[in-house]
Image (tube, grey):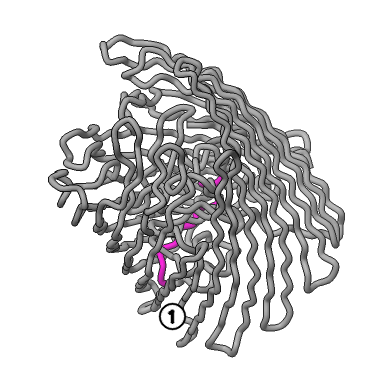
Amino acid sequence: MLFFFSNVQGQQLADTLHELKVKGKKDRHQTDDLRIKNYASGMKVQTIDSTMMQVYQQQSVASLLAQQVPVFIKSYGFNGVATLNFRGSSAAQSQVLWNGIPLQNASLGLTDVSLLPVSLMDKINIVYGGSAALLGSGNVGGAVMLENDAPSFDSNRKFKLQLSGAAGSFGQYQAGAKASFSSKNWFTSLQAFGQTAQNNFTFTDQKRMDQSMPNAQLKGGGLLWQTAWRPNIYNTFSLSAWFQYYDRQIPPALFEDISVKEQKDESARFLLQWQHQKGASKWYAKLAYLQDGMKYRDSLSLLNTNNITRQIYGEAGWQHSLNAHHDVLFFVPMQTSWFTGDKAHTQTKLALAAAWRMHYINDRLQVAINARDEWVNSNNFFLPGANASYQLLSWLKLKANVQKTYRVPTLNELYYDPGGNKDLKPEQGWGEDCGYTIDLHFAKRFTLHQETSIFNRNINDWIIWYGGSIWTPHNIASVHSRGIETSNTLTIQLNKWQLHFGLNTEYVLATTTSSYVQNDGSIGMQIPYTPRYQWQANIGCAYKGFYLNYNHTYVGYRFLTNDESVYLDPYQTGNVQLMYSFPFRNANWRASLQCNNIWNQQYEVVAARPMPGVNWLAGLAVSLW
């Protein structure tokens, strides 16, 4: 679990200074990505509302998702990797995108969401289920879409400055700053942060003795620079550069007596964008370069590796409104990934994609047909999809979605030395989901939102690593995932008080239906590290500048073996967030206090990786102009 500094947007502080409210329906499904904004009405898309974005400003995306979204976060504890599990998918079957650019490590095919700070992002959207026709191969389980706001141009030449700092349990300290300037034609912003932590929390070892976690220090920092130029009302050019560095010691697992492992993660991401909008047409183009470096050292085993992977991503698209009822989108994405060294390898993806949206009956009925023809090196495959929504009543909407899913093996799975398997076949199958949303407003005091989704997915040639002294990936199974998700929120307005209640639930049955390995006991069993049940509850209130929330999270059994013979017990944690926004001496201030695992539960998300007990983090942020 990583903590990040609190970055307070000046406008947000002004909006919440006198009366902080839990946002309602208008905050849902806010994204600037044309693919999801206009061509995914029948898909389940969840937006983290502005209040929760403020609440979790000091934490990582992993912490936010684990407590607020029915997506299982497979966390290896402090300083450990945290990956996504959507609806019983593997980490490599889920995507993380930054302003539409895939962030997955080019070699591993996954993203460590514990290294992504909420404070650097303005919007976070979660897309449930496969959407490969829109987002590309590899999107099997779902996607987390991280976005920065479009540049804001102001003819009054505005300058803003925000400063922040925080301190907490286990020697945690962090600081940050953000400065931005906008004029009629130019916008630029620079944000930087740094943090250190000892992470020496107390845990109980296998001998039932309390110990302080050794070899767990962390230090890191980063910088996000954005600049944009608008030469006229039709065109906008922008450039973003995002750098991060983390040096983290890796604590010993419970079965290890000592650990001197250390990992350094470095990333550099550049994104150049152009947008042109005139009349019924919108053109866009983007070009990105991403470099990820990981240095791993273990002096006890004399292991010292330095892996560097690089990616170039480009995309050009055109959206046009044919008439009052039909819109089309054509786009051409291209991605080249490679790693260097003695055995360098490259993977290139090129696709032609299109989406067609039909909307009738005053937009109550929306239907989208999406298709992608993609080439990966010399292999070609076609990915169709369709989704629809219908506003049956003013308060009731129906949704349905069907997509073909496909994931090509990663560079590591194909070429890792030793252990890569060049004969791997792609994972492929179909996914479907349907559901409804209810939005009710009554008595001018009550707002109720209820959403239910039922999903089904079959994947063939599922890739799993196994072996003895050398692990190797194999296509060994077919997996059937199905289940139901619900999202329920109720807000009550009582004069200047606002009360909120929320409950997210998920039931996932992800079982092996066939296996190439005889007598492995996996048929009909839940796949490893996929809990059948999980839920999150929130209850709290807002009054003027005060905000208080209690979160309770439950995660069910996680099986460690294919035959369900070894498992981890369920766990539940309680977490409290408190914020207060106030003016003082011509500046806007925000104080925050977060307390996690307040019931001091001992638990493990991943076997032999203990999680911390009760811990806290206090922060203070100020917007000077």
How many callouts does the rendering have? 1
Residue 320 part of the magenta-drawn span: no
* Residue 239, quarter of the rendered image: bottom right
Residue 71 seen: yes
Q: Which residue is mark 1?
A: 367
Residue 70 visible, this orientation: no
* Residue 43 counted in the magenta span: yes
Question: Does residue 252 sit above or below 149 in this rendering?
Answer: above
Q: Is residue 278 above or below residue 577?
A: below
Type of residue at label 1? Answer: Val
Secondary structure beneath disc 1? strand
Q: At 20% across and 48% down in the image, what residue appears?
A: 517
Task: Determine the image quadrant of residue 556.
Answer: top left
- Residue 158 in the image: state x and y as whole percent: 83, 51
* Residue positioned 38% across, 72% down in the render: 395
The magenta stretch spans which residues? Answer: 42-54
Q: Residue furthest bottom?
A: 323
Which one is in front, 65 or 439?
A: 65
Residue at image coords 60%, 42%: 340
- Quarter of the image for the C terminus: give it: top right
- Residue pictured at 37% horizontal, 71% vertical: 401
Residue 489's image quarter? bottom left
Residue 306, position as x, y percentages in the image: 58, 32
